[in-house]
């Protein structure tokens, strides 16, 4: 855990709002710990700290995979790197970008753990403030624009995110 905070801080603290967002997501994840099995709580919070490091270690330009690949090179546990690769419905956005093959090394999971990570990210705005999922999605579409990959994937990704939110809220 300490290592996750340190690595995230090293990579993201120079990026301003991205670091504020990450701190917010990590704190949100801590508050969602009760929604996951006790054995998964440390992984949840570590993944929250690390979920956006791909913005600091650009390789393919698709940040969920870039973050996961960087963690792979540092020999982080495969389960954690897979959570980072798939956070917030990344597979839908990867498909919209024609990058679905980049997800191949990372098996998707639908578990309370993956749900909690995605919910923490999608209820924390770009400056680290807690928001509703609907507000987050509206802001995201406005910020990225109607031709963005997120907009193209929205019809598939949004239902997944709303279903995820419902599952997490039912566990609180
Ligand atoms: Fe994020």
Image: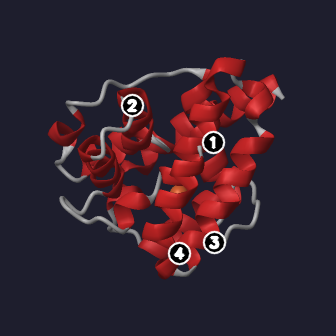
Disc 2 from disc 1: Cα separation: 14 Å
The residue labelled by disc 4 is: 13
The residue labelled by disc 3 is: 20
| As drawn, 89 above or below 7 | above
* First-in-chain label (4 vs 2): 4
Cβ–Cβ below 8 Å for labels 3 and 1? no
- For this rendering, which residue is in front, 3 or 128? 3
Question: Which is more foreground, mark 3 or mark 2?
Answer: 2
Secondary structure beneath label 1: helix
* First-in-chain label (3 vs 1): 3
The answer as to whether callout 4 falls within 8 Å of ligand 1 is no
Disc 3 from disc 1: Cα separation: 15 Å
Q: What is the x, y in percent for residue 43?
A: 57, 33
Q: What is the x, y in percent for residue 56?
A: 36, 68
Q: What is the x, y in percent for residue 110?
A: 50, 22
Q: What is the x, y in percent for residue 139?
A: 60, 69
Disc 4 from disc 2: Cα separation: 23 Å
Residue displayed at 66% across by 52% down: 26
Secondary structure beneath label 4: helix
The residue labelled by disc 1 is: 45
Question: Which is more foreground, mark 2 or mark 1?
Answer: 2
Q: Mark 2 packing: few (<14 Cα in 10 Å), some, or many (20+)?
A: few
Residue displayed at 41% across by 27% down: 79
Disc 3 from disc 2: Cα separation: 25 Å
The residue labelled by disc 2 is: 77
Residue displayed at 43% across by 71% down: 144
């Amino acid at each position: 855990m300490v290592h996750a905070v340190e690595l995230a801080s090293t990579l993201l603290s120079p990026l301003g709002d991205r670091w504020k967002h990450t701190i917010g997501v990590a704190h949100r994840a801590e508050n969602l710990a009760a929604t996951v099995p006790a054995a998964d709580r440390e992984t949840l919070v570590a993944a929250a700290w690390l979920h956006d490091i791909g913005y600091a270690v650009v390789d393919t330009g698709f940040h969920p995979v870039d973050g996961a690949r960087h963690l792979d090179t540092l020999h982080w546990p495969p389960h954690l790197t897979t959570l980072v690769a798939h956070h917030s419905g990344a597979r839908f956005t990867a498909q919209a970008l024609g990058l679905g093959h980049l997800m191949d090394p990372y098996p998707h999971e639908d578990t309370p753990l993956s749900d909690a990570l995605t919910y923490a990210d999608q209820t924390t705005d770009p400056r680290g403030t807690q928001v509703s999922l609907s507000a987050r999605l509206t802001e995201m579409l406005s910020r990225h624009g109607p031709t963005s990959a997120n907009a193209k994937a929205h019809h598939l990704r949004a239902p997944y995110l709303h279903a995820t939110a419902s599952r997490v809220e039912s566990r609180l």
